[in-house]
Amino acid sequence: MKALTLIVDNALLREYRGYAILFLYALSRIGRMTRPPYALAFLHQFNNCILQGIGVLTMRATGLGLIIVAYVLTVLAADSGAAMQVLVIVIFREGGAMLAAVVLLLKVGTENTSRLNALWRSGEAGYVDNLGLSAFDYLVVPRILAAICAAVMLTLYFQLLAAMGAMLGSPLFIDTTFDQLFEQLAGQFDVADFCYTLIKSVIFGAIIGTVSCYHGSVGIGGRGQGIRNPLARSLLRSFFFMTLFNALFAYLFYGVLLFGLIRTPV
């Protein structure tokens, strides 16, 4: 039993190490992405990520902003200032980056894993190598970097639409103007919130791109490691790492860094 546990633990450690190696490799190849044909591959993947995400996020973001404001104003019977405060916490601080990342994972992460898996198993990746191009630089690295950039853009897009939906819908429930709501929203939002959500979206994109491409290419070497159901494993691992990072980063950013390691008991 101990031997079996050790084997499982070693397999997990090798897999996690593989994620780190692949991500560091992608970062080391950023310079190559500025030259054709790798630049075209990156732009193609980035456009695909944006198009896949926008179609899902547009109505959901607008509706969610309106629902949050309607709930605070009607059910909680609070004022517009409280509604904007809840909107900042839910959309700009905690929920926006995660919701955009989940959409990116389901739409693009699954596509990366299945597509790359098919390319390697069919031998098309080897054909890219025969053309004098690096298969990993042409097929994998653009997907990882595109997922990072797209996660940031989709998060900002989601937050903007949610804020617009909230401010445009608020006059339906309370006597206020768009200018007043905008001032209240700006008063609740600060630079720390922007940096917080920006860092989260970058990490989420890195997790989605790296994990999905790792399992799609069947390991760092692109050759079989006997991974069963790579799509399911990619989804579970990506969601696990995103959830874990979201909880830890929220505590570190708002619980430790801003308020100190030791709190004075009341």
Image (tube, grey):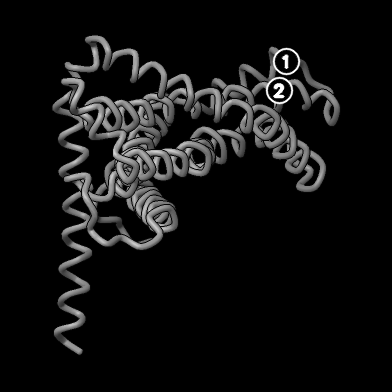
For the residue marked with disc 1, what is the amino acid?
Phe
Residue at the top extreme, as displayed = 35
Which quadrant of the view contains residue 160? top right
What secondary structure is marked by label 2?
Answer: helix
User: Residue shown at 14%/27% (left/top)?
Assistant: 28
Quadrant in which the C terminus is drawn: bottom left
Q: Is residue 138 visible?
A: yes
Report the residue marked by disc 2: 167
- Tell which circle, 2 or 1, labels the residue nearer the N-terminal end: 2
Residue 178 numbered tag: 1
Q: Residues within 10 Å of mark 1 (few under 14, many from 20)?
A: some
Note whether 70 is above or below 52 in the view shown.
Answer: below
Note whether 149 is above or below 14 in the view shown.
Answer: above
User: Residue shown at 42%/27% (left/top)?
Assistant: 152
Query: Marks 2/1: CA distance?
Result: 6 Å
Quadrant in which the N terminus is drawn: bottom left
Name the foreground residue: 23 vs 169.
23
Compared across the picture, whether 219 is left or right of 102 comes to: left
Which quadrant of the view contains residue 125? top left
User: Residue shown at 26%/47% (left/top)?
Assistant: 260
Residues at discs 2 and 1 in contact (Cβ within 8 Å): yes
Name the foreground residue: 94 vs 209.
209
Q: Position of residue 165 (x, y in %)?
A: 71, 25
Name the foreground residue: 73 vs 9.
9
Give the mark count: 2
Q: Residues within 10 Å of mark 2 (few under 14, many from 20)?
A: many
What secondary structure is marked by label 1?
Answer: helix
For the residue marked with disc 2, what is the amino acid?
Met
User: Residue shown at 85%/27% (left/top)?
Assistant: 172
Name the foreground residue: 154 vs 6.
6
Q: Position of residue 105 (x, y in %)?
A: 47, 42
